[in-house]
Image (cartoon, grey):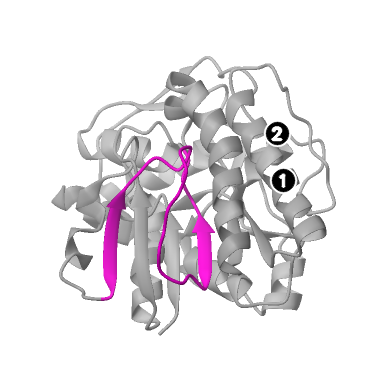
């Protein structure tokens, strides 16, 4: 039986990844300091004899005695509210945490996969964004702590690949949604859904003409696994290339929730990206992967989960 360590495994994407890997027959060690993760996301796995939870901050030395075949580094705050409230831990987990996880991968001769982000492209001047695009990032802005932490994480990951021959993977993850998102994390999907379910005004920033693309979480974790077992070492975009305006997305949420909510407009946050759309040509060609879930199907499942909560 192969063993995978998932850092940040009690988070939104990390917990779904733990589910996917255990279903694939792997032993999974979930490591999380619960700064933004939630143990409730993995409670259903606690009785699985092939699953283990370890509460630990990966910015400190990581000690795992047993063999490891895979390390998937997902530990990091991932929403604007989080990383603007705790910028220093965000920078530390992207730098020190990635360094520690890579050192462990080197020691264990494990495959290492970094959860990077579309935010490394900043407010892009190219749309859609291919992996070859270097980005347009404000390194000293309020979002810089997250953007630059992930850009550093990519740099050190490639350095470990080139110098120490670690088998590394880099997943550039675009907007992902689904059950287990935190209601108050500030991202557009849970914010709009919860406002709509409460018949509160949906807050759209700017004029709502900025665009986003949304990938359902089950599609994403499948792409992550395909990248993990592939022979690719360079970054790969994983996301849904179907782009839509935020204002149109808000109207769709109101319709799907049968809400009485109205839309209100607020000032656009500093450095908020105007466009966000992945070029997934590389993932389609080299991983034979592309999203399957329609936006409406994924949103209905997500809305149903939030209703239960």
Percent coordinates x, y for residue 247 in the rendering: 51, 36
Along the viewing direction, whichever of 288 and 257 lies nearer the viewer: 288
In the image, residue 55 lies in the stretch drawn in magenta? yes
Query: Residue under circle 1?
Result: 156
Circle 2 sits in a helix, a strand or a loop, which is it? loop
- Say which residue appears at 41% left-offset and 59% top-offset: 64
Image position of 248 with respect to 231: above or below: above
In space, the residues marked 1 and 2 are separated at their CA atoms by 19 Å
Would residue 149 appear left or right of 267 to someone viewing this image?
A: right
Q: Main secondary structure of the magenta part?
A: loop
Comes first in the chain, label 1 or label 2: 2
The image quarter containing residue 82 is: top left
Q: Is residue 123 above or below residue 226?
A: above
Residue that carries the numbered disc 2 in the rendered image: 122
Q: Secondary structure at mark 1?
A: helix
Q: In the drawing, does residue 242 fall left or right of residue 1? A: right
Q: Quadrant of residue 56?
A: top left
- Quick check: 299 left or right of 142? left
Residue 156 magenta-highlighted: no
Q: In the displayed structure, would residue 292 be above or below residue 267?
A: below
Seen from the viewer's position, the closer of residues 228 and 194 is 228
Q: Position of residue 297 (x, y in %)?
A: 38, 65
Relative vertical location of residue 9 with respect to residue 282 in this rendering, above or below: above
Q: Which residues are magenta?
A: 50-76
Front-most of 7 and 103?
103
Task: Kindly indicate the quadrant of the structure image that contains residue 228.
Answer: bottom right
Residue 128 screen position, x and y as percent: 75, 50
Q: Residue at x 40, y 73 (%)?
A: 21
What residue is drawn where x is 37% and y is 34%? 185
């Amino acid at each position: 039986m192969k063993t995978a360590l998932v850092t940040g495994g009690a988070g939104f994407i990390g917990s779904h990844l733990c589910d996917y890997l255990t279903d694939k027959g792997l032993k999974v060690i979930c490591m999380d300091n619960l700064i933004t993760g939630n143990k409730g996301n993995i409670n259903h796995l606690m009785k699985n004899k092939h699953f283990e939870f370890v509460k630990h901050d990966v910015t400190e030395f990581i000690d795992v005695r047993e063999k490891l075949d895979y390390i998937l580094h997902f530990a990091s705050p991932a929403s604007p509210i989080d990383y603007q409230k705790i910028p220093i831990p965000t920078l530390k987990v992207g730098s020190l945490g990635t360094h520690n996880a890579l050192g462990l991968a080197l020691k264990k001769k494990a495959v290492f996969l970094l959860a990077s982000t579309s935010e490394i492209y900043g407010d892009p001047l190219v749309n859609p964004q291919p992996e070859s695009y270097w980005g347009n990032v404000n390194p000293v802005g309020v979002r810089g702590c997250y953007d630059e932490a992930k850009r550093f994480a990519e740099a050190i990951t490639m350095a470990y690949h080139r110098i120490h021959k670690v088998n590394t993977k880099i997943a550039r993850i675009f907007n992902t949604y689904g059950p287990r998102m935190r209601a108050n994390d500030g991202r557009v999907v849970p914010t709009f859904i919860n406002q709509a379910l409460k018949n509160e005004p949906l807050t759209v920033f700017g004029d709502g003409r900025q665009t986003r693309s949304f990938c359902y979480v089950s599609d994403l974790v499948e792409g992550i696994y395909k990248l993990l077992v592939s022979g690719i070492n360079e970054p790969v975009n994983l996301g849904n290339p179907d782009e839509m305006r935020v204002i149109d997305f808000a109207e769709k949420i109101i319709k799907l929730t049968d809400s009485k909510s109205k839309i209100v407009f607020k000032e656009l946050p500093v450095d908020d990206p105007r466009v966000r759309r992945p070029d997934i040509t590389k993932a389609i060609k080299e991983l034979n992967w592309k999203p399957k879930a329609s936006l409406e199907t994924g949103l209905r499942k997500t809305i149903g989960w939030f209703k239960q909560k």
